[in-house]
Structure formats: structure tokens, C-alpha cells
Amino acid sequence: MSDATVSEGPSRGEICATACADAFRGNGEILASCFGTAPAIGARLAKMTFEPDLLMTDGVCTVVDMPNPVSGQGHEQVVEAWLPFRTVFDHLWNGNRHVIMAASQIDRYGNQNFACIGEHAKPKAQLLGMRGAPGNTISHTTSYWVANQSAKVFVPEVDVVSGVGHDRAAELPDATTQGHDVRFVISNLAVYDFETPDKRMRLKSTHPGVTVDQVVENTGFELVIEGDVPETRLPTADELALIRDKIDPKGVLGREVPNPE
Amino acid sequence: MDKRTTEQEAVAELRDGMTIGIGGWGSRRKPMSIVREILRSSVKDLTVVTYGGPDVGLLCNYGKVKKLIYGFVSLDSIPLEPHFRKARQAGAIEAAELDEGMLQWGLLAAGHKLPFLPTRSGLGSAVTDINPDFKMVQSPYPGPGGADGEELLAMPALELDVAFIHMNRGDVRGNGQYLGPDPYFDDMYCRAAKKRFMSVEKIMDTADMANEGPLQSRIINRTMVDGVIEAPNGAHFTECPTDYGRDEAFQKEYAATAKDPDAWEAFKAKYLDVESEAAYQEAVRNR
């Protein structure tokens, strides 16, 4: 590692990516799947450092020892296994996965929407559709990544529930929700969890340079905020070097998460 | 039996109001030459079951779709299918949206001649609001987790009148072979359908197919197919590895037309409202 590589302090994006990596901490030998650049960097970082046993794909249907960088030169990936779409469902219904999905809307219990905005029958904006969100959330650990948090994304009520949150899961029988585990929300401002008695979203940490007021302003519901909220940890020098040299040498992360002015 | 046929003859089997399944996934190995033939036909009010890509955008745009049964519609490199979005935002189609895994389950149930398959997927989400006809079923057995009488969602069989798939290789009898990395759900569409048409990049002698790929690539056997259509470049502009990748430039051009009615009319006139698949392929070559 050269000093030049880490001479600049961590960017907001790098802090987010490291928080995404931390979301996989302790997961061991499970399939790690990601939507978005920060989660994709985070999963690679976790695998290169503290979670070497994570299973990851090339983004299509091959499990590889280490997926290619999110930018820059690819490497010769060693194939570990074949995972076509049909077996993705076998795998995920089995529960052995942690996915970080995107959220166009998310509420205080972690109900998520990326299907469409407005009424489902005639939406104002058609987005991705349900995709695998209902089955993912009911079957295995799910976290969310929000690249641009605002009160339009953190909403009192989502228009359409694609990913099942804690309040709706609580209404279902235990057997149905044995795999349900909506764990973290990571945004460009902060990290959240659901470690509260009624599993409402809690402000876990704010990113350095972000105030609690700023988080509250950009949240359309009442967050659980307990005492002095800690700061999200900074990436270590080694982690920064891995991100900048190995995972994202062209710095595409800055496009997803611009540094605050 | 020689099952060779044409896109025209296959599409002539369609009647207004039928349910069709389209193989492939997103903008990958779609039977596009058949989709283009449907655009040229007078058939309408179709129910379309698919892991959607540009097939859905085109069929919606041409007013062919009454109801769509899907988990998503995407062009992959362009995440949102703009023509599908327009149709949805105009409220032009009935959108029976599912979790992706439920779609597989419905096809599998139909293929196994079962009325449903049980799942937890969809429970707690808007899927059950969007599909109010879906029913629950109680398990007669204790579950692997030890739960008694678990209530599960009964994903109904998605029975198809006609299935269309595209393979890399096939023979005249209807044996089919994919050469790319993923079979998607193409065999399931065939087993779920009363009538099955398979387009292929190349028809060849059965014996020679062994030289094209491993045994495991021979996923379609002839009991699953009623008609074989030789359609070189037939999946264009979706990808069909290992024969060709996605035509990204063409896909971009297609997607951009959603913003501009004049551009769309020009695109249609140049590529779609032509007399045949051969004319389409020529227009693509000459662009």
C-alpha cells in the first residue's frame, strides 16, 4: 500500500461502502447479493477482509472466488459453482442468503417498495416491479441501500409493499416468517437497524459530517433515536487501499454517492 | 417427424384472448422473430406470462396485451423497459405482478399438471392485494421447522395455450440445445403449454448437436415441442450467447424511441412494420 493511495481521507461513498461491508459481518458462508455500487463494493470488501467465506456471483449465473472490480480491469475469475436463475430461488427459499436491495420507498418498519410509485393499477411511475423482493424478505436476511435519502424515500407509508417489513411479518404466523430478517438500512446519511422492542427503525449511526437533525429532516417518519448517536466508523487504511486499488480503481462510487459540498 | 415450420404458421395458431408464455429472461435469448411476427398479426387481448424484456415492451406498444403475468420487465443494461413503463403508466394493461419465484412455481405447477404449488413467497407483500384470487392452503404435515398446519400461499398453475422459446441449436424433430450459461425457465414454459414452438439459431442433424455443447445443454426433448423454426439472429436484439451478444446500440435506439413519438414511428416503419423477419434482418444489417 502506498501512502499516496490513502493520502486523501475517506469519501462519503467509501464510508457507505464500508458500512455495507459491515452489514455482512458475522454472516460466514452464505450467498451475498447486492443492488447498487456501494453494496457491491461493500460485499467485495467484506470478502477480502473479515468475511472470506461469503459466496458471490459474477452477477449472472456463476459463483466465483472473487467477483471482478466494480470498475477498471477485470481479472481471471475462478469458477466455484453454477447458479442459474432457477436455482437462485432454490437457494434463497432455503434461507442461505443476505441481499442488500435498493429501495425507492421504505417505511419505519422496513416495508420496501421498488415496484412502482402511485397506485399499482395505474402507477405514476412504473419502476422495476416486485422482482424477488417478496420471496427474499420472507426467506432470508435482507438489508437496504438508499443512495439518496430524503423524506420522499423514507416515507410514512410505501405505495406498494414489495419487500415485507417487520410489522407485516409480525401479523403472519411464525412458521411463515422463520427466515424473515430485515436487518439494516444504509443510506448516504446514516445507518439504521430495527433493534427496538416493536422493531421500528432506529438510527444506529450517522456518517461523519452528518447531524441527527439532517437525518430527521430527510426522514418522513419518526425514527427511534436513543441518546447520543455514534458516528459510522471510518474505513481503515487497509480497507481504503483495497477499495481504491482493487475494487473501484476508476472511482465510479463517487457517481452514486457524491461527496457533500 | 419433421416439425419444421415458420413464424407465420406458429402465430396463425394464436387466437384473441389466448394465454402465451415467452421464454428467455429480460433482454436475454428471447424468441424475438416470433414476437415480431405477432406484431405483424391481427391477434389481440393476449395474456402474456414471462420474465419480461423487450418482448413485453413491443407487445404492449402494439396493443396486443390485455393482461401481463410477470415479476419484472427489464432490458438488463437499461434497467427499466420504457415502452412497458408507458403502457403501465397509461393503465393500458392488467398487471398481475408476482414475485419472480412465484412465476417459476406457477409454470412448474402447470407443467406437472398440478393445480398449485405451495410457497411462502408473496405473503405479507402487495402480491396478494394485486392478485386477490390467490388462496391459502393448510399443510397436512408438520413443517421442517416443526410447525403444525402451516398456512401457505397456493400459487396457481400458470397454464399456457402456447409457449414460445428460442434455443441455439435444434433438430427437425424438436430436440433443442442452449449454449449460453443459463437455461432460464424455457423447459418449464414448454411443459406448461398446450402448443409449443421453438425457434433456433440453427437446425442441424441430431448427431451433430453432440459436438455443439455438453449433454446438459440438451434441455429440450422433442415431446416438449410441436414446431421448430429456424431463425438465425432470431433473438436479436436480445443476447443469444454463445452465438451473439446483445445489440446494445440497437437496444439503445429502441429504448430512446419511447421519449419521442416521431422517433418511434420512424423506428416502426424502418424495422417493425416490414413484410417479414427477413426484411427486419436486412434492415438491421443495413443500418
Image (cartoon, coloured by chain):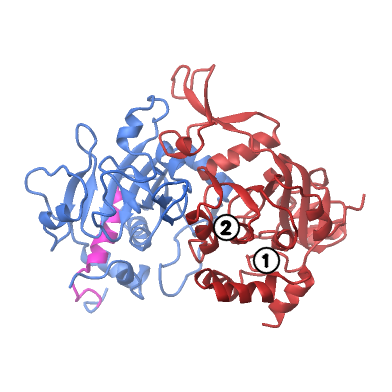
Picture colour for chain A? blue
What x and y, as percent, mark residue A237?
A: 21, 67
| Chain letter of the residue carrying label 2 | B
Nearest to the observer: residue B64 or residue A54: B64
Q: Is residue B180 visible?
A: yes
Is A14 within the magenta?
Answer: yes
Foreground residue, B13 or A54? B13
Density class for disc 1 (Cα within 10 Å; few <14, some 14-19, many ≥20) is: few
User: Can residue B184 be seen in this snapshot?
Assistant: no
Residue position for label 2? B26
Q: CA distance from mark 2 to mark 1?
A: 17 Å
Magenta-drawn stretch contains A156: no
Q: Is residue B220 above or below residue A76?
A: above
Residue A203 appears left or right of A94: left
- Residue farthest along the bottom direction in this orientation: B286
Q: Residue at x 78, y 70 (%)?
A: B275
Q: Which quarter of the figure has residue A72?
A: bottom left
Q: Which class describes the residues within 10 Å of circle 2: few (<14), some (14-19), or many (20+)?
A: many
Amino acid type for the residue under numbered disc 2 = Gly
- The quarter of the picture where the C terminus of chain B appears is bottom right
Question: Which residue shows up at 47% across the image and 71% down it?
Answer: A74
Give the image location of residue A69, x and y in percent.
41, 67
Secondary structure at badge 1 equals loop
Does residue B158 appear to the left or right of B172 in the view shown? Answer: left
The answer to which quarter of the image holds residue A234 is: bottom left
User: In the picture, which chain is red?
Assistant: B
Can you say whether B175 is above or below A249 in the image?
A: above
Res. B242 mark = 1
Q: Which residues are magenta?
A: A5-25
Residue situated furthest right in the rendering:
B1
